[in-house]
Image (cartoon, grey):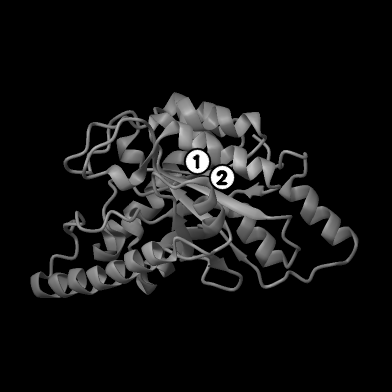
Amino acid sequence: MTDPTHSGTTSADASTRANATGDHAAPRARVPILMYHSISDVTSKVFAPFVIPPHEFAAQIEYLASHGYTTLTLADLVRIRLSGSRLPPRPVVLTFDDAYADFGETVAPLLLRHQFTASLYVTTGAVGRTNFWVKGDVPRRILTWDELREIAATRVEIGAHSITHRAMDALAAPDLHAELADPKAQLEDRLNQDVPTLAYPFGFESGRVRAAAAAAGYLAACAVGYQMSADGEDRFALSRLIVLPGMDLAAYGRLLDGRGPQWVQRARRVRSLAWRVVRRAAQVRTRGASAPLDTSLDKGD
């Protein structure tokens, strides 16, 4: 799959034109990095905020196409920023965590139809299984290795999302290294391509985790943040905006413009920060840094 908009302009073309004219000055722009999980009509109370009905998602893709958005992978965005090249018109990054089977069934055909691209983050220990880390959800199938190879051949960026979907900021050094390095190696070996980026499970990261991600050879990583990604922010903690079910196209447009629903994003951001403090305090008390913590109160990623 290529990176063009509906008009046929790729991110690489845009970057090349900027370089050819000597225009290397990138504006200090904010870019929406949208976070999706499952695109399905099957939902549950515990996972409902992270399940977008297919008809809503299809309408969102049509909105992007009709409003002239250029889809980038996360790696595209970071490389453009690092090179100082000009961003293409109306850039947006579509990210999908966990690698649910409905990505292949519903998302990939829509992306291909519009010549859009996306970044798909895989929990390698769940490939061909179900989302065992979400307690109380219906069993939600994860893509198989064969399905991932088919998707990778369309030029969707395949990224890492750990092995076991544990919160990385709560792991001791050996486990943290394994959860970062091993899925990158597994994906590169199985798919025969570079895996440049990752998404932190539940969005939890820290300075120690960011440094470990860089040491593991990643180009960049995304957290959650619940805000637009600003030029110059830490490329190992790129901010994302969550797309909520039931969002009409007017609200979707405001989200893309960084205008809303801001109260939802800010409330989630405050809760995420507060929950992180609670989790770390519990970790210090128990000194169980290598054990997975209860993340049921904050499934932000």
Q: Give the residue at x 46% y 53%.
A: 198
Q: Which type of secondary structure does the marked residue at label 2 adopt?
A: loop
Q: Nearer the viewer, residue 58 or 219?
A: 58
The amino acid type, in three-letter code, at marker 2 is Asp
Q: Position of residue 174 (x, y in %)?
A: 28, 60
Q: Nearer the viewer, residue 4 or 146?
A: 4
Q: Give the residue at x 59% y 34%.
A: 111
Please name the residue that numbered disc 1 is placed on. Answer: 188
Please name the residue that numbered disc 2 is placed on. Answer: 194
- In the rendered image of this protein, does residue 107 appear above or below residue 179? above
Give the CA distance from mark 2 to mark 1. Answer: 6 Å
How dense is the environment of label 1, judged by Cα within 10 Å: few (below 14), some, or many (20 and up)? Answer: some
Q: Which type of secondary structure does the marked residue at label 1 adopt?
A: helix
Q: How many marks?
A: 2
Q: Earlier in the sequence, mark 2 or mark 1?
A: 1
Check whether the beta carbons of the residues at disc 2 and disc 1 lie within 8 A of each other: yes
Q: Quadrant of residue 25?
A: bottom right
Q: Quadrant of the N terminus?
A: top right
Q: Evaluate whether residue 275 shows in this view.
A: yes
